[in-house]
Amino acid sequence: MAAADILEKIPELDRSLTSIEAVIDPDKLRAEIEDLEKQAAAPDLWNDQENAQRVTSRLSRVQAQLERVSTLRTRLDDLGLMVEMAQEEDDPDALAECDRELRKLTGDIETLEVRTLLSGEYDERDALITIRAEAGGVDAADFAQMLLRMYLRWSERHGYPSEVYDTSYAEEAGLKSATFTIREQYAYGMLSVEQGTHRLVRISPFDNQGRRQTSFAGVEVLPVTEEADHIDIPEGDIRVDVFRSSGPGGQSVNTTDSAVRITHLPTGLVVSCQNEKSQLQNKAAALRVLQSRLLEKARQDREAEMNALKGEGGNSWGSQMRSYVLHPYQMVKDLRTDYEVGNPDAVFDGEIDGFLDAGIRWRRQQAVDA
């Protein structure tokens, strides 16, 4: 891209970033950070562990939010200077670097713009995701495994840490279910629009007659609990079973009874974890998953109560929401937003940001229209 073209696009990015700053309000964030730092420095802070957790967690998140927008502003200001220097020195390599930075800045500013739309109670949290094979037999199990890889690749592309808690393998191929976390501020807010039923249409690789097969997988997205969430689980309310891990193993994973299944007796919720080496680690991970599910159940109960008071039914955006078609044509389409791409391979390789952005904007518009 020519220097003049880059310079022409910089004011557009400046307007976008300025509108983001108007929403985020960096001065307000700095004032909040100053107040939280005073609270965090108090010698008696940890006398109240619940409040200490709230203060330190909030401080970390606000600092990260301010740093993100401040860094973008600095990069945008620097880009103009870089272009001018490249012009003066007639340096094509430097100009190519400016072009790369422009493209990256454009994507980063668009991502932050979408994040400003995330204002839900738990949107800032890490995400806990469970994928389950549904109708479609072995094709559905294979599809569930494809979706697991898709989300982990998305996480990897962005440099977000992820951890798989549990994988239940199907007999012939693929997965019955998998549960994992993605640890990044706003991971829940971004990925919550993925919740629902995903549909795959293709020529089945497991059908000897080469027939077209439609299969389904369900995606559940929950916020990860924090210490201040008041999700108390009395020992008498749970049953803990241990069993031997299944599927690909190594390092004694499959040779000891280290896997843990926890049943929450009052609600009937069942969670399991088998990917850690020790029974204690698996129990701790399973309890974190159970806490997230109980937190979500409490949120759903509150929402159902409010809907009943308003005389409205619950929203249905979390039902069937995306189709992945590999035959007779190639397309991935979101059924709520109509956003679509013609390259399923790229989507399955983790290129889902367009779907996430469209879903977040769609959900915000639904809330405005309600």
Image (cartoon, rainbow, N blue to C red):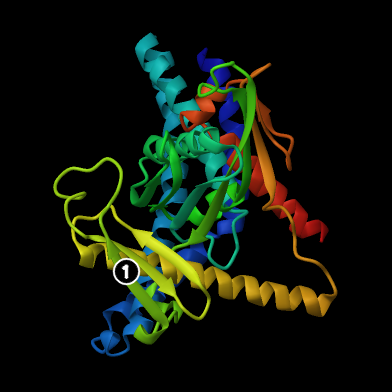
Question: From the viewer's perspective, is residue 342 above or below residue 281?
Answer: above
Q: Is residue 4 left or right of residue 227?
A: right
Which amino acid, mark 1? Asp
Circle 1 — which element? Answer: strand
Q: Residue at x 54, y 32 (%)?
A: 139
Residue 262 lies in quadrant: bottom left
Q: Position of residue 6 (x, y in %)?
A: 53, 21
Quadrant of the image containing the C terminus = bottom right
Q: Is residue 169 left or right of residue 121?
A: left
- Front one among 164 and 271: 271
Q: Position of residue 94 (x, y in %)?
A: 36, 17
- Residue at the right extreme, as displayed: 311
Report whether residue 260 is seen.
yes
Residue 101 lies in quadrant: top left
Q: Residue at x 42, y 63 (%)?
A: 271
Q: Residues within 10 Å of mark 1 (few under 14, many from 20)?
A: few
Q: Position of residue 199 (x, y in %)?
A: 64, 36
Q: Residue at x 41, y 45 (%)?
A: 71
- Front one among 44 and 287: 287
Report whether residue 86 is seen.
no
Q: How many numbered circles are shown? A: 1
Q: Position of residue 185 (x, y in %)?
A: 43, 55
Q: Residue at x 73, y 39 (%)?
A: 335
Question: From the viewer's perspective, is residue 5 above or below residue 338?
Answer: above
- Front one among 27 and 66: 66
- Residue at the front extreme, as displayed: 208
Label 1, on which residue? 241
- Front one among 345 and 282: 282
Q: Is residue 283 left or right of residue 125?
A: left
Question: From the viewer's perspective, is residue 84 above or below residue 317?
Answer: above
